[in-house]
Image (cartoon, coloured by chain):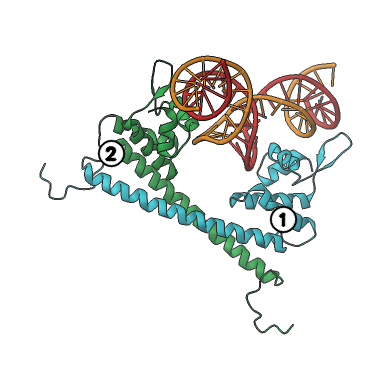
Chain colours: A green, B cyan, C orange, D red
Amino acid sequence: MRIGELAARAGTTTRTLRYYESRGLLPARRTGNGYRTYDEDDLKLLRQIRTLQDFGFDLEETRPFVECLRAGHPEGDSCPASLGVYRRKLAELDTLIEQLTTVRAQVAAQLTRAEAAVPGGPEPKCELGGHV
Amino acid sequence: MRIGELAARAGTTTRTLRYYESRGLLPARRTGNGYRTYDEDDLKLLRQIRTLQDFGFDLEETRPFVECLRAGHPEGDSCPASLGVYRRKLAELDTLIEQLTTVRAQVAAQLTRAEAAVPGGPEPKCELGGHV
DNA sequence: TCTTGCGTTGACGTCCGCGTCAAGGCTTAC
DNA sequence: GTAAGCCTTGACGCGGACGTCAACGCAAGA
């Protein structure tokens, strides 16, 4: 199949596929007239990449999975290198979630304090005891 | 004080201060020779910006806080607009944390599944019953 | 006087994953 | 024949918050 069809079947764009190729992630065979050609295996590789991208993996982080599939393994994560990426991503996510949770708490505290200092805030849920 | 001193006192760079000025966030007075001049109030504004930046606020999101201080209020969050930014940021953080938590769970599940399929993973904590 | 160390503006570089032309060639349907 | 719709490469744009020159001016101490 050609690039347009592959892109459509994977729910992405031709620009993206050419970008992946430029990164050496998804090289393409060529027909006589210079058109890129892909097969079902390429679609599988592409879907692996897209799934990981949707998870927030960097493109480079998808490379071990792609190479694993290309090496003939049934799944992209059937190789130790892929597992390593999983583990590093988990640690990264844990750190990030923890940081964001901390920030969230600080912002919430600031909001509470500021709301108390400026009672005339928008949308007071109800007037508790305050005779106006 | 001049730009270098202000940057040092706020723990940032002159480039950053010029950038803020270009965004209209922290305009500077000028001396006769064209040098930027700042006072203690500017330092306070700058610290407000930096604190919010450290929390992950976009530069534009710090603007209401800066304007609030410049309007003479004791704190950057003494104004309704600032409270609005707090609330939007909280909602944003909640959404983000939730998404990341979901992704984390999915990645963890993938890792568990893949580890089971490829038992020869690195660093087995201990050998349970497996005679080698 | 000369060097050092401030300051100035302007402009390009960075990172990442593409989007969006531009200018042209191939193929197919009408 | 020709128009539509695919393909090709190349190259600039974007967003955000600056970093990093370059080329210059101003000021103060040895």
**Percent coordinates x, y for residue D14 in the rendering:** 63, 37
Q: Disc 1 or disc 2, which is closer to the eye? A: 2
| Residue farthest along the right direction in this orientation | B32
Residue assigned mark 2 = A75
Q: How many marks?
A: 2
In this rendering, would B40 be left or right of B118? Answer: right
Tag 1, which chain? B
Image point (41%, 25%), residue name: A24
Marks 1 and 2 share the same chain: no
Image point (76%, 55%), residue name: B67
Image point (66%, 42%), residue name: B12
**Percent coordinates x, y for residue A31 in the rendering:** 39, 18
Q: Quadrant of residue A2?
A: top left
Question: Which secondary structure lies at badge 1?
Answer: helix
Residue assigned mark 1 = B64
Image point (48%, 55%), residue name: B97
